[in-house]
Image (spheres, grey):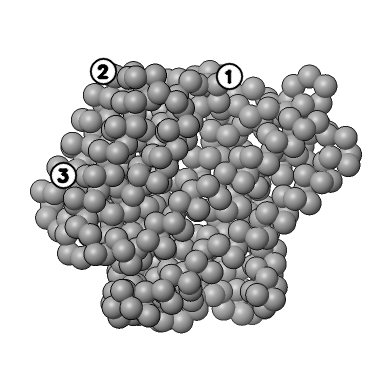
Amino acid sequence: MRDLAGRRTAAPITPAPALAAPAPVTGNPDAERGKVGAGWAARVEAMTPPGRDRGVDALRALAIAGVVLGHWLVTAWVPGPRGTVSVSSPLASMPELAPLSWVLQTLAVFFFVGGYAAARSLRTVGDPARAAGPAWVRARMGRLLRPVVPLVLVWAGIAAGLALHGAPYATVRALALPALGPIWFLAVFAALTAATPLLLKLRPGVTAASAAAVVLAVDAVRFGLDGPGWLGWVNLAAGWLVPYMLGVGWAGGGLASRRTAVALLAGGAAGTAALVAGFGYPASMVGVPGAGVSNLSPPTLAAVAFGLAQVGLALLAHGPLGRLMPRPRLWAAVALLNLSAMTIFLWHLTAAAVTTLAALRFGAVPGLLTPPARLSWLPERLVWLPVFGGLLVLAGAAAKRLNDRVSRSA
């Protein structure tokens, strides 16, 4: 089995039958539950290859958790006139919350670890320039793109059902577009993954610097010379190529010194601060509805600089995280999150959108269908996170069944 980044595990790490049907509880229920949890963690530990880099898995888990929590906290739906629903964000009315996006926008770490894992995986299959490379790409594309099919089918059904019940087009669009948004980033990730055999032939540092230069040039034309807005979409590939290529370099033994990590962190942070304070880039590292410029869609030079700081921080955190991972329960949670990364990434906003859709009949539900215009909205939204999480678990189980059917019919 392989995780989102495609790294092969020695054996599938799946919940043991005891988790689905634990032994009858006798005596102290808390003690019995503790034994079940400890037994499952021990089994995960036993199935983990001795040489696995658990620090990398921990970084990927943190990146996924940041993306999910960030989206759940900054994506809001607000009822409007004539039964419409629009997308909003607490960052639109409370710009002082922008530092929240600095903590929870972790996509650069996602691409950095993805580049590292892809390069390590490809180097194990032989010469990328020969048959091994194309075969590796085909297998990887199947694993990355096949799970998209159930998500698209589900939203096609939801959209059709809403249309048949007379829902306004604006409402269908406002619910579906955020939920399908992860496909954009997955498409970029898949393109970079497919290009990995070629990228391995290039010098990682030079390639990353060249990609950053492309982003700089595009931003200069867009913002300095009043160029066309569509030109910014060149940065969708160039911007994320920077951390991905740094990951490829890390897999090849680069970025090994602590001094390099500190330089990336300090330089990226200083660059981001200068671009925000001196050149008018948005302080928020995620898109804000209604804002004239987004740092993320498409990526700007500020997002690239911020990503460099995140890469530096990830390199510094890699060692300490790896030293924490031998704890069986902690490692079991990280392993499960890695094995479910694709499901979580693709379906987490669907869980929030479906919850919102189900609540429409109840009117202005606090934290769910109220304008995110006051600080009190955040604790109200936090109450809904367990609901989103529960639906995400159910969606993951259903998606797995759909994906298995698609795989068998492919």
- Residue of label 3: 262
**Marks 2/3: CA distance?**
23 Å
What percent of the width, then of the height, locates residue 117? 34, 65
Tell me the kind of residue under disc 1.
Ala
**Horizontal placement of 7 versus 85: left or right?**
left
Identify the residue at image location x=32%, y=53%. 244
**Horizontal placement of 368 versus 119: left or right?**
right
Q: Is residue 396 above or below residue 408?
A: above
**Marks 2/1: CA distance?**
28 Å
Tell me the kind of residue under disc 3.
Val
**Horizontal placement of 185 versus 84: left or right?**
left
Does label 1 or label 3 sit earlier along the sequence?
3
Q: Are marks 2 and 1 in contact (CB under 8 Å)?
A: no
What percent of the width, then of the height, locates residue 107? 40, 46
Identify the residue at image location x=57%, y=69%. 33
Q: Locate the C terminus by quadrant.
A: bottom right
Camera-nearest residue between 197 and 10: 197
Residue 394, image quadrant = bottom right
Element on which disc 3 rests = helix
Q: Are marks 2 and 3 in contact (CB under 8 Å)?
A: no
Does label 2 or label 1 sit earlier along the sequence?
2
Element on which disc 2 rests = helix
Disc 3 crowd rating (10 Å Cα; few below 14, some 14-19, many 20+) is: some
- Residue of label 2: 278
Camera-nearest residue between 379 and 350: 350
- Residue of label 1: 373
Identify the residue at image location x=50%, y=66%. 141
